[in-house]
Amino acid sequence: MRTTLSCALVGALLLAPLRAGAADNGQAVRITADSLVHERANDTIRAKGDVRIDWQGYSLLADEADYRQSIDTANATGRVRLLRGDAELTSDSLYLNLATQQGEAVNARLKTGEGNLRVKGARLEKHGDDEYRLERGSFTTCDADPPSWEFTASDLDVTVEGYATGRNVVFSVAGVPLLYTPYILFPVKRERQSGFLFPRLGSSTKKGVSVDIPYYWAISPSSEAILDLDIQSRRGVGAGIDAAYLGESGSHGSGRLYAIYDTDLQRERVNLSGTAKQVVTPQIDFNADLTLATDRAFYRDFGEASGDYNRQSLDSSVSLTKRWESWYLAGETRFMNSLEDTDNSLTLQRLPELTLTGVGSRLGSLPLYAGLDSRFTNFYRREGLVGQRFILQPKLTWNADLPQGLALSAWGGYQQRLYQASDGAGEGAPSTGLALAGAMASASFDRVYDAGIGGFSRLRHLLEPSISYSFVQEKDQAGLPFFDYDDRVVGQNLIGWALTNSLTGRSEQPDGVEYREILLARLSQGYQLSGGRRDLLHGADSDRDLTDLRLELRLQPYKNLLIEADGRISPYRGDVTTAALSADLHDDQGNLVGIGYRRIEGTVDYLEGKLGLSLVKPLIFNYTSRYSFDRPGFLESFYALEYRHQCWSVTFTYRDRPDNREFLVSFNLAGIGNLGKVKTF
């Protein structure tokens, strides 16, 4: 039986053992035990049997403990446990000053809930609330005993919610020493911490054996960077920095700078890329998007993703925008560096381009809306036609007020183009104007069904037919300068139709109602009454009256299955002119399968697939590949095999491209860091 006593009354009590007693020293220190004895001579409370001392968020548990009230110290022995938050210290014995939180423990083990850190040492010194020093210490994030891996050190300093540092460190796997380092530092904190990350190791036919040593820099609560030293046996030594920041009012930015002295080509090679958005005021934004490289082959040699090493050009832009209630003004400078041409002197640059747009403003109480699109562009290049173009296009839109489900709108406008050109065909100050018009009528029919199938309580079917008309005045523009296709507007007299079907399901979930679009299908086609048309994807049947029949489909019959299609069929030849098909199936366990097909007549024709398997735990396998039909062969294949353990994992990856084969090993220690590619932003 345990009762409660106040330490203020201890002096009035006999010095006999107290069964099931408790004491409180008046300073938020509470002691409970099976037996409490107060020794007046040295002002010590001796507690035995299931001892518990609580103070200032701490709890000390032991078989026996002596508490000296005058100097506020506790000396505990036998199954000692010190608890604070999710951190726990266990030891054979512990001497602790409750006021300063300083003390010493023998055969101590420290563990934290966050990161699952496990630290142990023959002798532990506690230097404060969360500061510890261990002699002959070790640490791991494995629960097993012995652990799968651990670091041992002659001296180990640990600050919970801070850093841990060690000297004369040996890394062991399954008890076998594998690596020695004179010093190590790693974070023991929920917040970001600066420090070295484990190096990245790899081998490829282009780079040879490579070692990348990264350093993570927590610059501030809103900015961070990774600096790395990249050593390649075949290409030399490079250095890079990846940085990102978050600013006020939605401002943000990120960038990467990488430079290497290529020993194979005997010259420096540099790449700079980044984006930034700076919100100057709620109405003014500054935006920058930069991609620069010292040579056209940089991405083919050092790019890792297909979107990098298959680049055709590098685009950089800087812009400033200003918004009003009904107006939008933007100024942009854009520079393009062609990676396909041997000389960039013929590449056309827009330096600068100004855009002023007026959104539809209603004219009084009439269902009429006035708008304006205008754009001024200065075209520059070192060789060839240069000059300026000004486009002014006012527009008037009418929206009919019809019963619910019906919509009718029409618009008309005029496009005036003015030029000032030199050094090529069309030089001088020519101009032209074109009349523009259009109309659209649509209807909407929907019906809701009580389903009770597929997990849905209700289904909503929506059918939307529409018909449209587009007119562009046909006019000879051969005498005008040609900077881009906006200088050769194709005359048009086109009628189009479309039919859209959608099916949406409603289901009741434990956390509320959920809606999912099960089906979205759209058929569309046009008929050319006169004039012509330009299809940037392909030129098939461009001189015929009927356009290709286009089908757009998005099907998601199950939450984890998605099918998408976008294709065009020639009504004259009956074949597919463009196609983009994909299907993805996945579960919540990491298993997935996906396939996609992409075809543009006369341009591209390839199949891509991906597979992820986690059926055989703890192995996870991923595979992606692209196969070209127009140039028979694989464009790229990527394999990854990961073995996951409770406190570590290792990943083997292999990438095979026609011009490069690369093998990487990524080793991850849970809660510590990873040996391999680091993606922070």
Image (spheres, grey):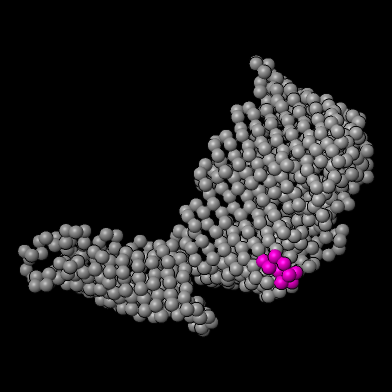
Q: Relative to residue 177, is residue 541 drawn left or right?
A: right
Which residues make up the magenta segment? 260-268
Q: Is residue 139 above or below residue 191?
A: below
Say if 450 sits above or below 358 in the image.
below
Residue 480 x %, y %: 87, 34
Residue projecting furthest to the top:
365
Q: Nearer the viewer, residue 568 or 196?
A: 196
Quadrant of the drawing holding the C terminus: bottom right
Pick whichever, 404 or 654, lies toward us. Answer: 654
Q: Considering only vertical position in the picture, is 232 above or below 464?
A: below
Splitting the image into 4 quarters, where does residue 320 fall?
A: top right
Q: Which residue appears at 73% of the width and 70% of the height?
A: 266
Q: Does 41 appear in magenta?
A: no
Q: Is residue 214 visible?
A: yes
Q: Name the residue: 60% across, 28% down.
A: 325
Q: Quadrant of residue 574?
A: top right
Image spot of residue 402 (x, y percent): 70, 21
